[in-house]
Image: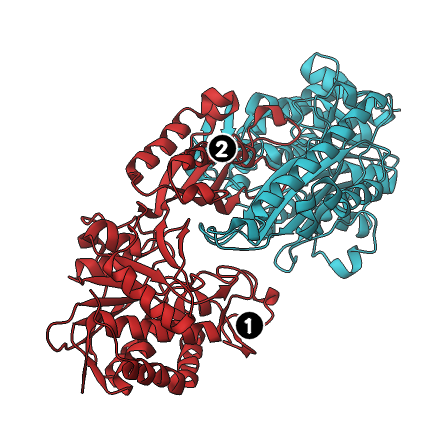
Chain colours: A cyan, B red
Amino acid sequence: MSEPLSNEAISAITAAVDAAFEDEIAFLQDIVRARSLRGEEAGVQKIIADALRDRAYDVETYGLDVAQLQSHPAYSPATIDYTDTFNVSGRKKSGHGGRSLILNAHVDVVPTANPANWTHPPFAAVREGDWLFGRGAGDMKAGLAANLFAVDAIEAAGFSLKGPLEFQSVIDEEVTGNGTAAAIMNGATADAVLIPEPTDEEVTYANSGVIKFRISVQGVPAHPREPESGLSAIEAAFLVINELKVLEARWNEEKTSHPGFDDLRNPASLNIGTINGGEWPASIPFECRFEGRIGFYPGDAPQDRMASLEQMLKTLGTKDPRLEKANPKLEWIGTCQAGYLLPEGSDAENALAAAHKITSETALKRSIMACYLDAALYVNHCGIPALTYGPLTKNIHGIDECVNLPSLKRVTKTIALFTAAWCGIAPT
Amino acid sequence: MSEPLSNEAISAITAAVDAAFEDEIAFLQDIVRARSLRGEEAGVQKIIADALRDRAYDVETYGLDVAQLQSHPAYSPATIDYTDTFNVSGRKKSGHGGRSLILNAHVDVVPTANPANWTHPPFAAVREGDWLFGRGAGDMKAGLAANLFAVDAIEAAGFSLKGPLEFQSVIDEEVTGNGTAAAIMNGATADAVLIPEPTDEEVTYANSGVIKFRISVQGVPAHPREPESGLSAIEAAFLVINELKVLEARWNEEKTSHPGFDDLRNPASLNIGTINGGEWPASIPFECRFEGRIGFYPGDAPQDRMASLEQMLKTLGTKDPRLEKANPKLEWIGTCQAGYLLPEGSDAENALAAAHKITSETALKRSIMACYLDAALYVNHCGIPALTYGPLTKNIHGIDECVNLPSLKRVTKTIALFTAAWCGIAPT
């Protein structure tokens, strides 16, 4: 059971969040401006490591060793090397008797598409009214700032934590989840994990399993004057994508046996995210590659879903004889992980709900996210309750991504009160 | 009327082709090895200019000046600059009284797709039995070699030409036709043109008009957990390509009023040659670009067909409301030229048929090519009969492109006899 916080402690901690909120926004702007596409996280990680050192965390930075990681079930196939990037971990020395907590956030961000389509440059971190704009502002540097300033507020209010706390700033969540996998391999463990992904102040009690793939199909090139002699690889790719849509429809039909997921229009949510084919406008294209993701339900083994996709590709020729020559080549290029499902009423969720109730005066809503979340690794591979709960955002992964600042303030308070209650506090 | 060649002249000229044929193959190998993708033709052009100088042609090399070219109707929209490449022209001083002739060939080649899929490396010019393999071996460096060694044979047989001859080695046929457009702007003119494209020893009496396009469509990016908020640009591209297929079907229906073309299964022959979209497997793609070509009939103004395609793109939203946001952007990226139609029984074609009859002992077959040919520029913009006639090949624009060497020898003889008869010969 959580230790109830005194009204005085609550007031002091939330007042401390209020007092430092302009600093929190300035820090968020700093880390948004430190553009951190996958593989390019070193710059922002250095800022975060310095911020932790300034706050007297015990700081550890460590790289990702794929040779070692790939033996762990939390590892997903990586398509980049991790030479120039690293995780950051900051530990607070604990008092006695409290429960332990990991505050986790990822710093990698997805590409921006054409910056010219943004109202504000995607890495300028422009503040406009109640919103802060920028790639990563919502997903999830705001959450990372909330973690940092939540712990600051507890200390500024005159308390130290009884239970041990680890602050994790991880890389490569957007493709693989290998940053958090490395944290787990590095020994991270706790009684609970909180990850402030952008959830509009709801707690995510389940997510989808996700597999990410690259498929290359071949055509038979020929001059357009005799197209019968060729097979367009782009045409073949369209046909394969149509078969993937059949798979998506079939997997969506299974939602009726997955409570919660049956409310989603499209839980499998096939996405073809990239396509590249051909080399010449007037030649029949020889090769076409596309990348995407598809989801499934908690409890499903990703290996089974991967096998279904492989099987579909093997039998393409029976769907359309033109595809017999398409010679599809499949690669796994990121997250291949199961979804998680957190039972209602856990101590950790109750503690979060209590903190949320104080800051938001509403009951905590539980919801599902039909996408990969690092929480899945802690829940599925470590048996740790991992709560995903973060601020209101708009357009994550899109144009004009932004985070709502009043929401960020509430979330910072909620995380501070949750942390204080979970780990326990003592006057310093 | 062509001057009939004496039997002695025929024997001497064809014997000279036989005698030099191993040299011709060696020369062809040299120019195949001089890889000449569009914009990279300078190396092979230097070899050809040297070969012409060695043969006492009057050699001129000249660049393409887009500012000047684009005022000419033979110009098609270029997407590269021509700084590092040039045309080569070689002129033979004439005697008196003969007709003039242009022997034209292009040296640019299309990309190879993955060289690993070739039996022999695409620029190794490997000879195997009756075939010489390589990108450009068929389309159309063999034809260029035939032009060169045909004139050599006439001279080696002890004759000079009465009428003026221009040997043209032009660039950038595969995308635009601007090499030949530049030759025309440079003042090239003659009573006939011969272009030994790979036609399997048939004469091409008509080709398609062709327009080449690049279309970019936009999506609305969003996170896959809420796909309803986004529109996939790759999905949008598929829908636009489907509308292009509707256009293709409609244009194909018109074939019934175009004799010759009504025998072709697919005269419009829409080809989507390249596609590139998205930047991230798990983001809904924001932009997708594809390039292609579509054909139409001789007598059709390309401007009208371009307008049809533009109109289709403007009304996409009426076909599918999802496409209202797709904001398609259209660029013309190469050939935008009408097709040509050569009436049967011209002096030039009769002269070619007579030469072909001698070397092949069969009547010359007339056929259509549903693709762009440089002959169209001479026919449509200069009113010059331009004959397209060349060797038997396999897999042009494909994997394992190759030219048949016995056919190349026959074609070299045919070109030699045609040239001798057309221009007239006198003993040297």
Query: Looking at the figure, which quarter contains the N terminus of chain B?
Result: bottom left
Q: Amino acid at mark 2?
A: Val
Name which residue lies at 69% across and 33% down.
Answer: A245
User: How many other residues sit within 10 Å of disc 2, few (<14), some (14-19) or many (≥20)?
Assistant: many
Name which residue lies at 33% across and 70% down.
Answer: B355
Q: In this picture, is B156 found above or below A419?
A: below
Q: In this picture, is A235 found above or below B131?
A: above
Q: Could you confirm whether marks 1 and 2 are on the same chain?
A: yes
Q: For the view shown, which residue lies furthest in the left direction?
A: B96
Left or right: A402, with B80 as reference point: right
Q: Chain of mark 2?
A: B
x, y percent for residue B207: 36, 49
Q: In this picture, is B123 found above or below A187?
A: below
Q: In this picture, is A64 found above or below A130?
A: below
Q: Amino acid at mark 1?
A: Pro
Residue beneath label 2, please? B240
Q: Chain of mark 1?
A: B
Q: Which mark is residue A166?
A: none
x, y percent for residue B285: 55, 37
Query: Which element is circle 1 on?
Result: loop
Q: Which mark is residue B121?
A: 1
Q: Nearer the viewer, residue A182 or B140?
A: B140
User: How many other residues sit within 10 Å of disc 1, few (<14), some (14-19) or many (≥20)?
Assistant: some
Left or right: B216, with A42 as reference point: left
Query: Which element is circle 2 on?
Result: helix
